[in-house]
Amino acid sequence: MRRKLVVGNWKMHGSRPANADLLSALRGGRPYTATVAVCVPFVYLSETAATLAGSDIHWGAQDVSAHAQGAYTGEVSAAMLAEAGCRYALVGHSERRALHAESDMLVAQKAQAALACGVTPIVCVGETLAERESGLTEAVVKRQLSAVIHQLTHCAAEMVVAYEPVWAIGTGLTATPEQAQAVHAVLRAQLQAATGHGQTMTILYGGSVKPDNAATLFAQPDIDGGLIGGASLKASDFIAICRAAH
Ligand code: 13P
């Protein structure tokens, strides 16, 4: 039985007062049956750590450098994230793939850098609307995941995968539970074939998850929880989504 995981991705939102309110509400919403985490902007990691210390809520970053250290202005290494107590780092979010031209190979190297420092990469994959309409969904997500599997080799079973159809992110359009389940089943079969541990690996769904659709999505056999954008910024919505995962 896989334990559900719900991760909030704050993206580039927040302020010290707003974060303090949100995090204390989240603490107050416990206990959760699911594992719960928030991925916050780098600059807020230490205060997030201070607020969540001693709770069972985890925190993480939204990106990580592929490099261990060096002259990489503006980048943050996995070792630094580990030092900040990060349990997770998102890698390959579609916004980074699209807006920062991150390739499948770079995403794979970032996942490897995270794992090397004990930070679990949450590897995001997903097709655009044009790709879905051309019947390419399966090919695209398998290609994106395959790059990471090959890079991580024997450690591949340690990653978390998040299926986020690009057309469902921030649009209010959610994949139907059946559409999401179909892709999750493909990803799980790929993970099983490559690692032998597909049945125990966590695969999240992301893209316009809200309190009113979370339970149906999470009830699908291969959907192990969610990666939540907009709704993770409103305490009552995020807590409701966390509670829908059990
Ligand atoms: P929304 O929940 O706002 O659609 O964002 C999903 C997402 O990109 C999470 O990483």
Image (cartoon, rainbow, N blue to C red):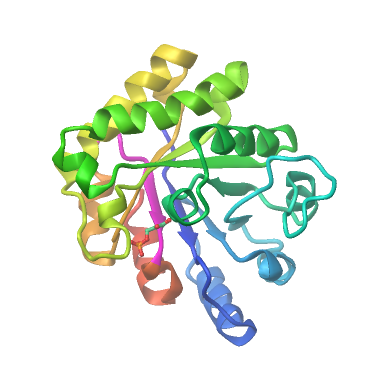
Q: Is residue 129 above or below residue 1?
A: below
- Ligand 1 is found in the corner quadrant, namely bottom left
Residue 141 in picture, x, y percent from top left: 34, 33
Q: Is residue 164 above or below residue 20?
A: above
* Residue 151 magenta: no
- Could one spot residue 1 in this view of the protein? no
Residue 97 in picture, x, y percent from top left: 47, 48
Residue 30 in picture, x, y percent from top left: 50, 64
Quadrant of the snapshot with the N terminus: top left
Q: Is residue 186 left or right of residue 16?
A: left
- The boundaries of the magenta stretch are 221-229
Q: Nearer the viewer, residue 89 or 97?
A: 97
Q: Nearer the viewer, residue 59 or 111?
A: 111
Residue 96 in picture, x, y percent from top left: 50, 53
Question: Which residue is the extreme one toward the right?
Answer: 70
Q: Is residue 54 left or right of residue 221?
A: right
Q: Residue at x 42, y 32 (%)?
A: 144
- Could one spot residue 84 in this view of the protein? yes
Q: Residue at x 33, y 20 (%)?
A: 189
Q: Is residue 228 above or below residue 193?
A: below
Residue 15, quarter of picture: bottom right
Question: Which residue is the extreme one toward the front?
Answer: 101
Q: Residue at x 58, y 78 (%)?
A: 19
Q: Residue at x 75, y 38 (%)?
A: 117
